[in-house]
């Protein structure tokens, strides 16, 4: 059973009495901060206090200002992280919940391990003892990052499947890879893909009439992704639309047969879906389609395609 040092009731009452009421001014050496980031429906929240370097150098190591052997990456009360769905943190599965964050120092007082602690109400000088329910990760510290006077937690990179959570302080940077469970199925079954496979001659359509024809080829790769590859698509002002022709578009199956949601992928990762836009394929008796239309969020058709082969 875990045991934690806790302030006495009298001390707690004294601290509560000292907390300023709403509207009163208060200046802290380490101000509180909250970072909230949503990644594909999973909300991350980090609550922490932000110490300053205040000229202290080095921040870590045997010659540094002495930190506790177990240090919360913040100040005052332990830094907390919460997420309402299971995630993968540095390749390790972590159940949904709220945790306090701590860093264990090695014998040279250099950061060695970051760990998630289920107990979240711990003052920074207490430092939890090792327990079986802690989730631990080795850390690597960069020492030549752009200087940051105030300790900062930040989501430096966000994409549809996760992102990079970074801790910055002084010239130091710690980066952690986060992945979330996708909220939609990106892949198509062979049966779903069969209706689309092949090359189609397509045209932009609308009030301005039809564009010159261009080519779109649908292919189903070994990873289950259904791709739409463009060739010769014209730009609105004339010439070819270089961005569109280079686009790696994924076709995401919907609940309706023959309907697909288009999305943009970069470096093999889906970054954005075209919300409200849908490819609609009209199925023949053999399960394939000879034509398609692409509809916008107002259900207006702005592209048509006819099978070539």
Image: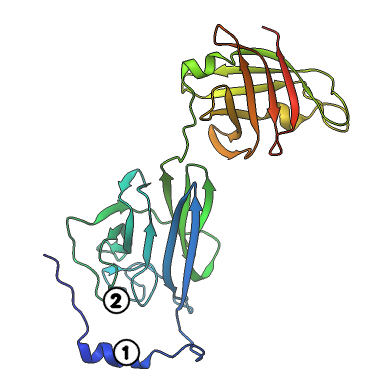
Of 56 and 76, which appears nearest the observer?
A: 76
| Quadrant position of the C terminus in the picture | top right
Residue 139, horizontal then vertical, whole percent: 35, 54
Left or right of 279 in this view: 222 = left
In the image, residue 113 sits, relative to residue 202, either above or below, namely: below
> Split into 4 quadrants, where in the image is the N terminus?
bottom left
Disc 2 and disc 1: Cα gap in Å? 13 Å
Asked if marks 2 and 1 touch (Cβ < 8 Å), the reply is no
Q: Which label is found at residue 95?
A: none
Q: Nearer the viewer, mark 2 or mark 1?
A: 1
Q: What sort of colour scheme is used for the picture?
A: rainbow
Tell me the number on the disc at residue 15.
1
**Nearest the eye: 76 or 146:** 76
- How crowded is the residue under tag 1: few (<14 C-alpha within 10 Å), some, or many (20+)? few
Residue 153 visible, this orientation: no
- Image coordinates of residue 34 in percent, x first then y, are 47, 68
Residue where numbered disc 2 is placed = 123
- Taking the image as shown, residue 250 lies to the left or right of residue 161, namely right
The local crowd at label 2, few if under 14, some if 14 to 19, many if 20 or more residues have their Cα within 10 Å, is some
* Residue visible at 87% across and 26% down in the picture: 209
Percent position of residue 106, x then y: 26, 61
Q: Is residue 136 left or right of residue 88?
A: left
Front residue of 189 and 26: 189
Tell me which residue sits at (54%, 10%) in the image.
Answer: 287
Question: x, y (%) of residue 251?
Answer: 58, 27
- Residue beneath the point at 69% across and 31% down: 295
- The reply to whether residue 117 is in sight is yes
SS label for mark 1: helix
On the picture, is 101 further left or further right than 31?
left
**Residue at point 17%, 59% (across, down):** 131
């Amino acid at each position: 059973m875990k045991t934690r040092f806790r302030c006495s009731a009298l001390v707690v009452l004294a601290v509560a009495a000292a907390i300023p009421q709403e509207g009163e001014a208060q200046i802290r050496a380490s101000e509180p901060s909250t970072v909230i980031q949503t990644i594909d429906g999973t909300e991350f929240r980090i609550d922490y206090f932000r110490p300053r370097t205040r000229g202290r150098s080095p921040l870590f190591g045997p010659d540094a200002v002495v930190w506790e052997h177990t240090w919360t990456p913040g100040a005052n009360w332990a830094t907390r992280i919460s997420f309402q769905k299971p995630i993968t943190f540095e390749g390790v599965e972590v159940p949904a919940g709220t945790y306090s964050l701590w860093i264990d120092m090695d014998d040279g007082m250099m950061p060695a391990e970051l760990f998630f602690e289920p107990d979240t109400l711990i003052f920074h000088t207490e430092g939890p003892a090792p327990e079986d329910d802690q989730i631990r990760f080795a850390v690597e510290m960069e020492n030549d990052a752009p200087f940051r006077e105030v300790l900062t937690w930040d989501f430096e990179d966000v994409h549809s499947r996760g992102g990079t959570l970074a801790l910055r302080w002084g010239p130091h940077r710690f980066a952690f890879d986060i992945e979330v469970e996708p909220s939609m199925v990106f892949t198509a079954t062979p049966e779903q893909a069969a209706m689309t496979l092949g090359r189609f001659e397509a045209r932009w359509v609308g009030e301005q009439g039809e564009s010159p024809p261009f080519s779109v080829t649908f292919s189903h790769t070994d990873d289950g992704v259904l791709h739409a590859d463009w060739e010769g698509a014209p730009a609105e002002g004339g010439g070819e639309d270089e961005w569109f022709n280079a686009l790696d578009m994924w076709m995401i199956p919907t609940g309706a047969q023959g309907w697909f949601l288009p999305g943009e992928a970069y470096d093999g990762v889906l970054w954005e879906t075209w919300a409200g836009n849908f490819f609609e394929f009209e199925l023949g008796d053999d399960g394939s389609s000879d034509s398609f239309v692409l509809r916008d969020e107002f259900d207006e058709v702005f592209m048509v395609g006819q099978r070539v082969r």
